Image: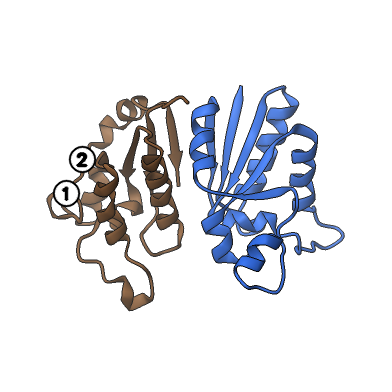
Chain colours: A blue, B brown
Amino acid sequence: MKFALLVLGSPLGSGGADSAWRFADAALQAGHKVPRVFFMHEGVYNANQLAAPAQDETDRLQRWQQLSREHDCELIVCAASTIRRGVLDADESKRQQKSAANLSEAFEIGGLGLLIEATSECDRVLSFGC
Amino acid sequence: MNNPPTLLVCRQSPYGSHLARSGLEIALAAAVYDRDISVLFMDEGVWQLKADQAPQAIDHKSIEKLLASFELYDLDTLYVENHSLEQRGLRADALAVPVSTVATGELPGFFERFECIISC
């Protein structure tokens, strides 16, 4: 089965993003596909590559990156949500006349059309709240 | 592309966080892509439908205005769950935009009409 995931929560603000990662990991291990994870609202903070967790804590960004790399899973941050919150790639940082970029390279900025597209191309859409 | 009947379930109060607005933006995006989209307001989400909102007092953009723009996108399949309205002393005939009501007991059948349900 093909799953699309919508992640609305930040890495530490709630359990939603953790649950989304666990679901994706379990689904992929069971042979399902997760072609796209869409991060919106506070969920875009999952893409902040400047997050520096303590040594004895789980590196949540690293495990999203690994999931994307190993399973051909697109990680998309909603453009409107991520620009508002200042999680920007180099191009967007320049466009917004900001001095730094902090979007992890495993993620791409995309419009809501990519979420809408995923809802029609996948068998199930799961949203993970905040 | 498939066009499965899709329902967006809005359960967030209008100004408690930014999520109410983001949710409605999903509905608008779906309408722009000519998708078969309906919206159900329930729980705290019914406050999004309240008439005469004055969000400028708390430095927010108006959810009521965003809802009013829905008709420009032919997005008129809006529903509200009755019990959530009653609990909050709101009336279906005195809301910001026209909506159809769904009784709590009808919800299971209502949800079955949709192939894809997105909640926020």
Residue named by callout 1: B92
Instruction: Kindly identify the amino acid type of the residue bearing the numbered disc 1.
Output: Ala
Q: Is the residue A2 above or below the residue A114 in the image? A: above
Pointer 1 and pointer 2: residues touching (CB < 8 Å)?
yes
Q: Judging from the image, what secondary structure is the residue with disc 1 in?
A: helix
Residue A76, image x and y in percent?
A: 62, 46
Residue named by callout 2: B101
Residue A43, image x and y in percent?
A: 59, 53
Q: Residue at x 47, y 26 (%)?
A: B1
Mark 1 to mark 2 CA distance (whole Å): 7 Å
Q: Judging from the image, what secondary structure is the residue with disc 2 in?
A: strand
Outermost left residue: B93
Q: Residues within 10 Å of mark 2 (few under 14, many from 20)?
A: some
- Chain ID of residue with mark 2: B
- Chain ID of residue with mark 1: B
Q: Is the residue A55 above or below the residue B11 in the image? A: below
Precedes in sequence: disc 1 or disc 2: 1
**In front of the other: A124 or A56:** A124
Instruction: Kindly identify the amino acid type of the residue bearing the numbered disc 2.
Output: Thr
Q: Residue at x 45, y 47 (%)?
A: B120
